[in-house]
Amino acid sequence: MSLLAVSGKKRQHYHPNADVWQLRRWWQEKKPILQAQILSGNFQFRELGLIRGEEKSIEWWSSLDALVLKAMTIVLTEHLKPVLSTRCFHLAGNGGLKGAVGEVAANVEEHPFVFRTDVKGYYASINHGILMDIVGKYVRDDAVLPLLWGYLRRYVSDGGEYIDISQGISLGCPLSPLMGALFLKPLDDCMAELGCFYVRYMDD
């Protein structure tokens, strides 16, 4: 299944006026332009919309931007998988929530003490500079790094007000679980060195 088909399937129940239908209609014309912009470093993400919920707000990427982010996620997941901890159960192929719970259940009786912690607002608290320093150790592609900065340093349109985001990563974005996993790689490495039984699952 093509990347466009995956994107279209996810948004197939959207309103007839949603931008995904224009993207699908004109994809053959847009595709070479998009590729040229990315390779030349001229691609820029559009401003995001903001969908407010009772408990949290989700930033809304345009269909074209979401497609680019999905492609980045696929490429970077393959590239970063060898260096990311298998104890990050939220990453694809590591078992998910069911795997994390099962791992804890299978090992809890062997350990007299259990420490459970949660980072409140984890995505929103991530420092862009620190994250990109970590990214730079493993990603050196001159076409990818500007895209990552654009994903981080984004603009959100909220009722006519434009907000410059200088901290945190985007909720509801396919790239964010991967970046969230990479940001805590130093913690994963420390826990591995200590030999502690350790499970990390992220649903922020």
Image (cartoon, rainbow, N blue to C red):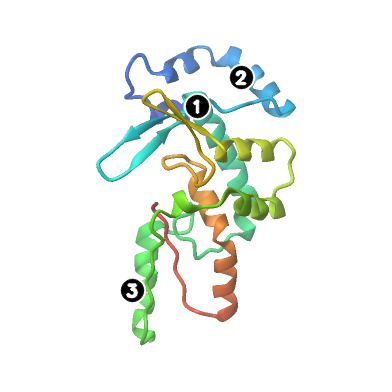
Could you tell me the amino acid type at mark 1? Glu
Residue 136, labelled with which disc?
none
**Which one is in front, 101 or 186?**
186
Location of mark 3 (residue): 105
Kind of element beneath mark 2:
helix
Earlier in the chain: of badge 1 and badge 3, it is 1
Q: Residue at x 59, y 59 (%)?
A: 84
Q: Position of residue 191 (x, y in %)?
A: 54, 74
Picture residue at 40% right of the left edge, 53% below the top: 121
Label 3: state its secondary structure. helix
Q: Residue at x 57, y 38 (%)?
A: 153
Q: Going from the N terminus, do you reach mark 3 or mark 2 first? A: 2
Give the amino acid type for the residue marked by disc 2 in the picture. Lys
Q: CA distance from mark 3 to mark 2?
A: 48 Å
Q: Residue 47: which disc?
A: 1
3D distance between C-alphas at marks 1 and 2: 20 Å
The amino acid on which the numbered mark 3 sits, given as a three-letter code, is: Ala
User: Horizontal and vertical percent for residue 11?
Assistant: 38, 27
> Is any atom of residue 188 visible in this view?
yes
Above or below, comparing residue 111 to residue 155 in the picture:
below
84 shown above or below 190: above
Marks 1 and 3 in Cβ contact (< 8 Å): no
Judged from the image, the secondary structure of the residue bearing numbered disc 1 is loop
Q: Earlier in the sequence, mark 1 or mark 2?
A: 2
Closer to the eye: label 1 or 2: 1
Left or right of 188 in this view: 171: left
